[in-house]
Image (cartoon, grey):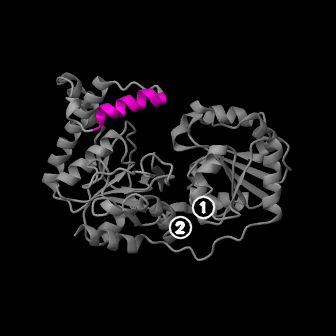
Amino acid sequence: MSRVLVNNKWYDRFCDPIIDKLKAAEFTSLHMEPLHQYHTPRYNPGMFIQPHLDWLRIRSLLQMRMRMDYDQLQGFKELLTCLEKTWGITLNEVLLSRTVQYLKLIAGWFDKIIKRTQPSIGFVVCYYGIEGMAFNLSCRRNGIPSVDIQHGVQGDFHRAYGQWNRVPPNGYELLPSIFWVWSETEARAIEKWNPKVSYFHQSFIGGNPWLDICKEQPEVFYGSKAYEYIKDIRQAKVKILFCLSGLVDYGVTITEWIQKVIRYSPPDWLWLLRLHPCELSERERIRALITQLNPAQVELDMATDLQLPILLQNVDIHITHWSTTTIEAAIFGIPTITVDQMGYDLFKNQIPEGLLKLAIDERSLSEAINSLLNNESQRIKGYEPRLNRAITEIMGLAL
């Protein structure tokens, strides 16, 4: 999901900028990529590990042993009672045992790779899957720091990053030792719970590698095709970027009241509808929906396929349900209208005043758009990439 096409090669937005900077500092890297999406050709070489993970999953089922002795886990029985009484949740102990077995097998496999390659540091994107936790475990017991690279919204209310209020004295083996975050806002969420375990879990403000590298080398990552398209969209009086949030099953789509606002907007407005990487398979469904609106006012393909930073630098307003693009828009001084209460609650403490509004129906969305257009926010000036400094600092922590 992190890959975008750059000059006909698949570029990893979070890993490749770091890999290139490490390479410039004469460090080699091994990039291991999971999931059943085998994008080729890739910008940097790497290793597809999903077949190995699938085999380990099969092994965990074939080698299933007796259920774990949960009596030896302090507070576990109390947890089960609390879950059942408070939320009506009954934990499947057999499934949990199988998951633990799978995690141990993956960690053991990572142990072999780490012992063979002798790395100084390990990076992971989205640590809170079973595979990411296994990677953290392997890094810890092999004596190297594991770094989770921020890939989306974090903060106090994210279950993987906020409010770890009862961390053991030695921290958690399955959590990363360093949280690479984009800004002070995300760092504060970590620092609220880590003071007593900062030796084991600390925040690191490294910035957004993708935005940084696009700022540093725009001609490489945008290309002539992008610039030609940007010339076209600049002719529209108002440019509105609508980023879908990737959860179609939960109704996150272009609802009827949003469709009405698009349909009846002035003819010199342009709506850029951008699909989330998780919902690229929905492209034709959304395209069919667009035909019911005003096709001349709506763009889907280029809005989805172009790199986000160049779009954000050339639009007036950003709309979403709860996409992380809200944070990225704020970096460029672009105001966001969230069309879901949860999205507004998620970002209201992270986005500067004046750059976030909530709309829950046709009328409030129209009013929010007109309000922002009549009081155009001052774009943030002087944004400077942090990646070069971040690489020096993060390797200083590792060596």
Mark 1 surroundings within 10 Å by alpha-carbon count, few (fewer than 14), some (14 through 19), many (20 or more): some
Q: What residue type is labelled 1?
A: Ile
Is 228 or 378 nearer to us in this picture? 378
**Residue located beneath label 1 in the image:** 310
Query: Can you tell which mark lies on residue 89?
Result: none
Mark 2 surroundings within 10 Å by alpha-carbon count, few (fewer than 14), some (14 through 19), many (20 or more): some
Pointer 2 with pointer 1, Cβ within 8 A: yes
**Residue located beneath label 2 in the image:** 218
Residue 6 seen in the current view: yes
Rendering coords of residue 261 (x, y %): 81, 43
Look at the numbered disc 1 and give the secondary structure of its residue. Answer: helix
Is 252 or 352 nearer to us in this picture? 352
Range covered by the magenta-colored residues: 75-87
Q: Residue at x 35, y 30 (%)?
A: 80
Residue 264 sits in quarter: top right
Rendering coords of residue 301 (x, y %): 63, 45
Q: Say whether residue 145 is left or right of residue 299.
A: left
